[in-house]
Image: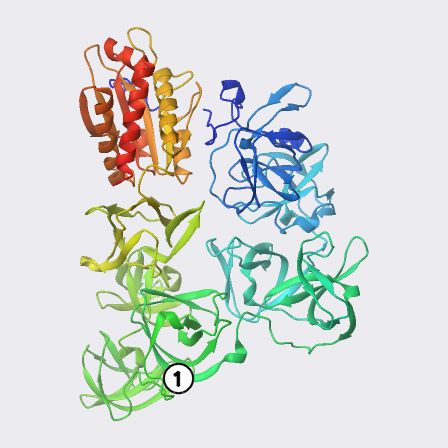
Amino acid sequence: MKKVIASSVLATSVLLPLNLLASESPTAYAASNSSLVLDEIQQIAGTTQKIGKYAANMRSGATTSYSKVVTIPAGTSLEILDAFTNAEKEVWFNVEYNGKKGWVTSELFEINVTAGESGVVINEPVKPIAQTAVKAASTSNGISYVGTTQRIGKNASNMRSGATTSYKVVATIPAGTSLKVLSAFTNAQNEVWFNVEYNGKKGWVTSDLFALNATAGETATSMKVVQQTTVHKGATKSYAVVSTVKPGTTLVIHQEFTNASKEKWLQVTYATGKKGWVLASAFEESSIASKVVSKTSTVHSGATKSYKTVATIQVGTKLSIHQEFTNASKEKWYQVTYAVGKKGWIPADAFETVSTVPENPTPETPSTDANIVEEKNSLKVSVPVANMRSGPAITFDVVTQARQNDVFDSSQYATDAKSEKWYKVNTTSGEAWLHQSVVSIGDSAGEAPIVTPGAGEKGTIKRANALLYANSNYNSAVLQGLAKNTSFTVLNKLKASDGTTWIQINAGGKEGWIPDFEVNENIPTKYGTKTATVYNGASATAKKVDTIYLSTPVRVLRTLNGWVNIETQSEKRGWIQASMLSDISPIQLSNGRTEVRNGQNYMVWSKPSKFDITYSTPSANVLRIFGNLSDINEIKSSVTGVKSMKVEKVSGGTSVLLITFDPNYTYTIRDYDKELTIKVVEKGLAGKKIILDAGHGAKDPGAVGPNGKREKDVVLATAKALQAELEAAGAEVVLTRSTDVFLELKQRTDIANKSDYDAFISLHADAFNASSKGTTTYYNATVNFNGPRSLTLAKSIQSDLVKAIGTYNRGVKEQVFYVNRMNELPSVLVELAFISNPTEEAQLASAAFQKKAAAGIRKGLENYFKQ
């Protein structure tokens, strides 16, 4: 690589699949834009294709985030039942193997299909790795419409080449047109799209544009919200909140969906022409009748026997009926609750008589009303962050969060299905429930705990700038201000209709009323969502008194018409719009947990907003994570490979996480927009995942030596030799290119950034003049999040590489090469030797030298993964 042209490393077209394909010849890859177009995909459906030389995982949906159903041996021929391009533009095939149906990425097939009359053979579709959870057509979402004829609504609709609005428009379909639904698909945004044919063209139309008739498994119905809830853009809480719905609101339900976390969500119309998703637990579900089963029957996931059997019901069982439906075969079916929180469909002939249920039946929710106990307790939060839910079970929404040492009064508790207690408390967001594991109990003798002094007792003002009112309401005259720590005697207490507890006091001979937040040590904290002005009144025209910023904590005194009365860190009191505050800090690591992903153990933290995290390695086996974090949720459960974990507060009140690993374990850390992950793995090279990037390729030869040797050729040969070395040591290896093709730099880093791999190594040959010599390893720490690990990797590889090949050691250097700078993995760029030097040119072209270089880099990686 020529140093005189800094951009020579910035090679720029075809993104190869991460797994090795059945053929490594250039003709085995699709050219140009490296993807199958819609017409080609449709022609593949119905053909028989063969799995390539690697066994293939069949999954329950069309991305690698779905669970594995079965592994299909290499060379197996399968009929392609359907084909789909997901939101990541990967082509996946629906197949059946050993009686099981599922989805396999097209990358693992040896595809041989003649497209149209052109006689063009479509080879392997070339796709990047995708981690986005795309809901495939194998889900129940929209499936009941497949095969039915549905009509476009009152607006013309665009038919697109794929199932998101990012795909190109292939036709415009007039309003009122009736179309047969060929297949259904739920994309990454949880939008249901239908595959249809119009004027000889096939494409995708969003289901929102159809005037849908009810079908098997889905009838248009309305349900009443029984607890305040949020409407989301998609069927998980990670999607944006688009609206808030109050108890008592009746919403039209369009469909239901169970996400990857086993949460049941319902799609609703929350405003004219606007649809969103709400957790099913927010609704009251009315039974229309109850029936007794007269013969042993099976319950199905839809209203025909072709749907999956979910339960068997014995004679004499009484079931609540929610809906009635007659399917296309004229069979009458009922939707029933067959277990707590579980619904399915059962044929009408399973029942005998109908007995009507009360007009206003008990709402079916996950709550445990029958086990509610009246008991007064004083609670103190014992964990850094505690989720507060809308009901007494883990299935209810998180409505807000409490922080360590926050204090609450509870007058009731409920026991869940595990006989664990949930305590009911009041918050600024309304009623909420706390689990027994996150609180410590104070006074539980049955009397109300005293939070404020009683009549005749003395106390002190806890807030700055407290006001003494003439009467027990905010509209009465202000008698005077009271400084923090002012002593007083309590004369009386009462609770106003707005929920405020007022205390009548005598302070220095002056009698008046104060709200209880003036004397409470613990009051709710909220956080700024952006830079915002604090006013001296509940109006944007009022005088400015202070400014808060992203993640600034403030104390909440009271709310009024969309405004919040707060006390800032500088103890200034004022008003701010409620939309400028959040119950949780936007800059924190929350919901700390352990997960198994692709068979490997992870520690995972959620990020409420996008912000940068920094880490360092202060000593062997110790990882220090920081970055202006207001809080870090410590994982309490034991983690294999982790010796200890603790959260510390440092100057400025920010939090730092210190993790000490077992001496036999190491880690790979990744900072994503929505989460931080730490993969915990045993030390050593075996099982590690490595990406090898041979620089340049095809039209870009790289540097050319005096005897005509080309950089692109020698580094590819070395990459293949290194692949063999690493795989022999038990590592999993991916080549960004295994043939003479050209890749843009972004394509190379995309392979790394969309993967769960552990290291990225880019191979190059240096160039300057005939006397230049030696080996250099580059890294980047100024931009790359994994700069600390990249430096460690660079030092390890450089040391063992120069020992193996005997070249001059030019050392480890930091640079801004794209493949390091824009890489999220620990990554290095290795300049093997100078191709501009005739002696080193000959060495670079030598198979023996390439093998030695491969052995040296492999040794460097072994030592890196031992640290």
Residue 222 position (above or below residue 606)? below
Q: Residue furthest top?
A: 707
Quadrant of the rendering where the N terminus is positioned: top left
Q: Position of residue 223 (x, y in %)?
A: 62, 66
> Which of these two is toward me, 357 or 694?
694
Q: Nearer the viewer, residue 613 or 813?
A: 813
| In the image: residue 273, left or right of residue 836 | right
Residue at image position (49%, 66%) is: 396
Residue receiving disc 1 = 376
Q: Position of residue 271 (x, y in %)?
A: 57, 59
Q: Look at 59% across and 68% down and name the residue there.
A: 340
**Residue 137, x across and y down, in percent:** 62, 45
Q: Is residue 534 above or below residue 613?
A: below
Nearest the camera: 270 or 100? Answer: 100
Examine the image and state in which quarter residue 199 appears: top right
Residue 837 appearing in the image: no
Quarter of the C terminus within the rendering: top left
Residue drawn at the location 51% of the way across and 27% of the way down: 21
Q: For the residue carrying disc 1, how many other residues have a C-alpha within 10 Å: few (<14), some (14-19), or many (20+)? A: many
Q: Which amino acid lies under the numbered mark 1 shown in the image of this protein?
A: Lys
